[in-house]
Image (cartoon, helix red, strand yellow):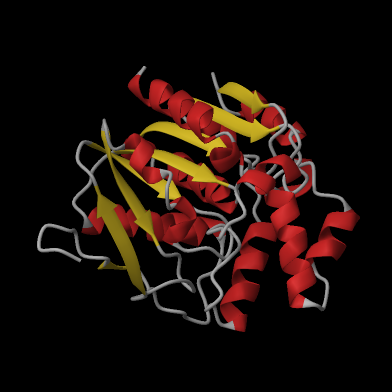
Amino acid sequence: MTDTDPPPHTFARAADGTALACQLRGRGFPLLLLAGQANNHRWWDGIREDFHATHSTVTLDYRGTGASDKPEAGYSTPEFAEDAIAVLDHLGIERADVYGTSMGGRVAQWVAARHPGRVRRLVLGCTTPGGPHAVERDASVRRALAQPDPEAARQALIDLMYSPAWRAEHPGPYTTLGDPAMPPHARRGHLLASNRHDAWDALPTISAPTLVLHGDQDRMAPPDNLALLAARIPGARTHLFAGARHAYFEECRPEASALVSAFLAD
């Protein structure tokens, strides 16, 4: 790190005292980037720079991941949303654009619903409303991810994230496969947080202009959820990426980043 590089982390404090590592990069209007389940800020490696022409980017290590504390409690999407607000408060950011993908999209729903004055524009990617109204992944996906052989489960996850054609040209390493240093209790907490998410009743209260994005070959969070979210959030726009799986933001990076940037500038 040179003298001009930003520090790797600064630490916010959640309401319960949990230390939350956060990272601020670039200059411009702030864009809060929220990662997927059991992932830290590295989920956004190589993508966040796409927005630095107009925005600064804010990321955090969820509780239980990265350099943040790993408490026994506090694992739910509404609590993750409050942690995100604590990060914005710590950085002195009154209002931001918010882009959440996968579980981060679920967290972003609560940020926008609970704190409408803090969100200028909202982007929800490869996510669902949760609860009984959501279209869930099928049982074969759950079985593949729950295999007792860690390497087999990892390969199944890679296949769910990226198409074979894209993987052939991008053999990795991948930064979207979870934080390997998470303790078991935190990993369980993230899984329960994602599984228990249900923002159905809160979605109509979201007032920020919203863009909903999805890969049309996503088996982790089936693409039918795009229409469900758009129908519940007033005025939401949508876009499906042809041939993309869960990590559309990497597989379709040029198109996806340009689309998000145009929406944020609109």
164 on left or right of 138: left
* Position of the N terminus by quadrant: bottom left
Residue 111's spot in the image, x, y percent? 44, 46
- Image quadrant where one finds the C terminus: top left
The extreme left residue here reads 3
Q: Taking the image as drawn, is residue 121 in sight? A: yes
Q: Is residue 9 left or right of residue 101?
A: left
Judging depth in this view, the residue of 174 and 138 nearest the camera is 174
Report the residue at 52% width, 82% height from top. Answer: 72
Position in image of residue 94 (x %, y %) = 23, 43
Residue ranking furthest to the front: 169
Task: State the image coordinates of residue 61 (x, y, percent, origin top left).
Answer: 41, 64
Q: Is residue 202 visible?
A: no
Is residue 61 positioned above or below 187 on the image? above
* Depth order, front residue of 74/38: 38
- Image point 60% across, 39% down: which residue? 251
Residue 105 located left or right of residue 162: left
Quarter occupied by residue 207 = top left
Is residue 179 rendered to the left or right of residue 61? right
To which quarter of the image does residue 191 belong?
A: bottom right
Where in the figure is residue 92, as x and y percent of width and height? 18, 51
Tell me: residue 195, above or below residue 148. Answer: above
Viewer-proximal residue, 162 or 180? 162
What is the count of numbered marks?
0
Displayed quadrant of residue 169: top right
